[in-house]
């Protein structure tokens, strides 16, 4: 039984990671590149959706794995301009995953999913935004890469890792609220079918 759960966890995590990476790579290209605001909004929202779903459906370690590996793959594919961004992106991803795992999976505000989700959405989005704004704009761009990158590139990255991060995190949370109950219902039905066989 334990082995089946482990295989399911690995399969679900791998699927969500694949969706995250494919979204970052193919959708970014289709929407005109990482500098395009529409691309940032759509791709960023979907990445946050996958992070939240992974935390809700598979637990913290699934979300942590996706949130840490996805930026590394994005960098290796040339989707991120500098390696110094990776730890802070991974940390920001982990922040929203951790908040959803703690608040929703542990039901710390009671059994109502909507209340837990609302608190997790606001807290998780703000925490991720704070980590990325502080880490990327205040540490990486001002202290580490200020002499390495062109002023225009620094300006673009500073904008990318500020207000849009809050918008995409909240949008991803809203999408998760709509999609997760459907996933939960399907999962329960398949589990029930498997037990009845």
Image: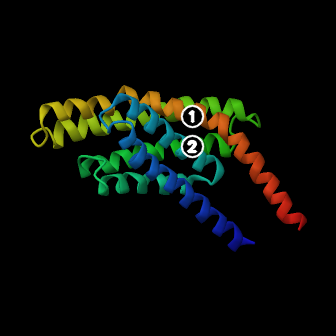
Q: Are marks 1 and 2 in contact (CB under 8 Å)?
A: yes
In the picture, the quarter occupied by the C terminus is: bottom right
- Furthest toward the front, the residue is 30
**Position in image of residue 116 (x %, y %):** 67, 34
- Read off the residue under disc 2: 52
Q: Quadrant of residue 69?
A: bottom left
Which residue is rendered at x = 31% and y = 39% of the image? 135
User: How far, Cα to Cα, is label 1 from label 2?
Assistant: 7 Å
Q: Is residue 189 visible?
A: yes
In this rendering, is residue 142 above or below 3? above
Q: Residue at x 19, y 35 (%)?
A: 153
> Which sits in the foreground, 39 or 171?
39
Crowding at mark 1 (Cα within 10 Å: few <14, some 14-19, many 20+): many
Work out whether mark 1 precedes mark 2 in sequence or the reverse, and give the earlier one: 2
Q: Which residue is mark 1?
A: 173
Residue 37 vertical position relative to residue 85 in the rendered view, above or below: above
In the image, residue 31 lies at what x, y percent? 38, 36
Q: At which x and y percent is residue 107?
A: 70, 41
Q: Is residue 189 left or right of residue 134?
A: right
* Horizontal relation, residue 52 to residue 87: left or right: right
């Amino acid at each position: 039984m334990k082995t089946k759960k482990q295989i399911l966890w690995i399969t679900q995590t791998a699927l969500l990671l694949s969706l995250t990476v494919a979204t970052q790579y193919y959708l970014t290209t289709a929407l005109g590149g990482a500098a395009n605001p529409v691309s940032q909004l759509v791709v960023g929202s979907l990445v946050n959706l996958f992070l939240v779903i992974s935390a809700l459906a598979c637990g913290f370690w699934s979300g942590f794995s996706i949130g840490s590996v996805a930026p590394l793959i994005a960098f290796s594919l040339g989707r991120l301009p500098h390696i110094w961004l990776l730890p802070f992106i991974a940390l920001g991803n982990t922040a929203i995953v951790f908040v959803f795992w703690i608040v929703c999976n542990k039901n710390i505000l009671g059994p109502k999913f909507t209340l837990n989700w609302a608190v997790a959405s606001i807290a998780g989005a703000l925490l991720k935004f704070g980590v990325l704004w502080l880490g990327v704009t205040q540490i990486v761009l001002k202290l580490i890469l200020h002499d390495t990158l062109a002023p225009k590139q620094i300006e673009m990255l500073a904008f990318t890792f500020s207000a849009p991060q809050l918008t995409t995190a909240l949008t991803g949370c809203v999408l998760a609220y709509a999609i997760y109950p459907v996933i939960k219902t399907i999962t329960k039905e398949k589990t029930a079918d498997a037990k009845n066989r």
